[in-house]
Every structure is written in C-alpha cells, then in structure tokens.
Image (cartoon, helix red, strand yellow):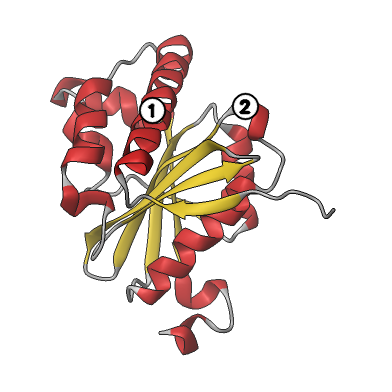
Amino acid sequence: MGEVKPELQPVESDEHRQAARSLIGEYLAWVAGVAQAHYGIRFDIDAMARSDLEDRSKFFPPDGRLYLVRFQGRYVGVGALKRLAPGVAELQRMYLQPAARGLGGARLLLQRLLDDARQLGHERVRLESLKALDAAHALYRSMGFVEVGPYPDNSMRAYQAPEALQAYRASAVFMELRLEASTTGAKAAR
C-alpha cells in the first residue's frame, strides 16, 4: 500500500461546513492566544467565525473558495480565498492542526488556492499574518510571496477598534504574490 497523503475537500455539504466551523474556531482561538501572548492585542473571534461561514459571498463560489484538508479519514486543516478587489484575492484562515503539520497539507492547500486565484482571473494574492508565525511565513516565501506594507482592504480592519489598528499592524506581516510572475504558465492558465 502506498503512502497516505493529505487530500483537499471543497466545503460543500453540511458535514463540511460543520468541520470548517470547528477548524476555523480552533484556528481563531489559537491565533488569538498568540496575538494576546506576543502583542497584547485582542480581536473578536466570534464575529470573525460567524462572518466566515454565514457570509456566503466571502469564501464561497463564485468569488471565494474554502477547503478542508483531510488526512487518514479526519479533517485536519482549513484554508480560504476571498476576493478583495478586481484582480486581487486574499488568503485567509490557513490552518493545520499541530499533529498534521509537516505532511504536505499546507503546501497542497496553498497551491490549490493559488491555482483557484489564477482561474478566477486574479493577478495578485495578499495575506496578513502575525509576525510570530514564522513557519507559515517560510511556506509563503517558498511559494514566491514577498513582504509589502499594510494594504487598505486587509481583513482585520473589520475586527479591530480604530484605536487598536496601529498596534495590530505593528504585530503583523503583510505579504503579496504577483501571480503572473509566480509561474511561467500562470498567464496561459487564464
């Protein structure tokens, strides 16, 4: 029997939505803990979780994508793509449970979301991430992302009080990938 590898599952059914809700909640609780411990900042994780799954225009077709990572019969990760503006998408909620890290699921998920962004006609993909998440940044850099300044339409603006935005920006890394430059076949795939 061959090596078991992670697989991706688009979030389509009630079962998938429940698994995504659980993993997004787990991710948000974890990242909120990191934000509080490292930077003393907080954000409204309940509002974020509600928005992620109840706002069908956010992560679901035709403009968005939401996937689960499945490994050995269990859902162990989640990741999403949303449209920010014409030609610009944003990665969000990229998360694998600690026991599932190092199996290739994050790279598989990231590549799929980037392929989807190309198919949707996006030229750039952005993301924001807490500075403390070095392993995630290494993955993004390995796929061609580079650091950029905070972009005005970043997702955390909706979950931070205006007076806390500067502290959040100081705790975050903002990255971008220009898809036309990321692979030789990106333009041909459109």
Query: Which circle's residue, 2 or 1, is located before the other in the chain?
Result: 1
Amino acid tagged 2: Pro
Residue 109: give x, y in percent of width and height.
53, 53
176 or 163: nearer the viewer: 176
Picture coordinates of residue 172 (x, y %)?
42, 33
> 10 Å neighbourhood of mark 1: few (<14), some, or many (≥20)?
some
Which disc is residue 22 wearing?
Answer: 1
Of residues 35 and 20, the one drawn nearer to the viewer in this rendering: 20
Instruction: Report whether residue 56 is seen.
Output: yes
* Position of 37 relative to 85 (above/below): above
Q: Which residue is rendered at x = 47% and y = 84% of the image?
A: 189
Q: Is residue 18 above or below residue 104?
A: above
Q: Indicate which label's residue lies in the foreground, 2 or 1.
A: 1
Q: As rendered, which of 4 and 144 lies closer to the eye?
A: 4
Instruction: Give the mark count.
Output: 2
Q: Is residue 44 visible?
A: no
Q: Which mark is residue 41?
A: none
Disc 1 marks a residue whose amino acid type is: Ser
Q: Quadrant of the C terminus?
A: bottom left
Residue 69 shown left or right of residue 151 in the figure: right
Image position, residue 104 (x, y; %): 68, 48
Q: Position of residue 129 (x, y in %)?
A: 44, 37
Q: Depth check: give the residue in front, 16 or 119.
A: 16
Residue at the image point whose x is 33% and y is 32% from the top: 21
**Residue marked by disc 2:** 98
Location of residue 24 by image quarter: top left
Residue at horizontal 28%, vertical 22%? 45
Looking at the image, the residue that sits furthest to the bottom is 188
171 up-or-down from 70: above or below? above
Q: Secondary structure at mark 1?
A: helix
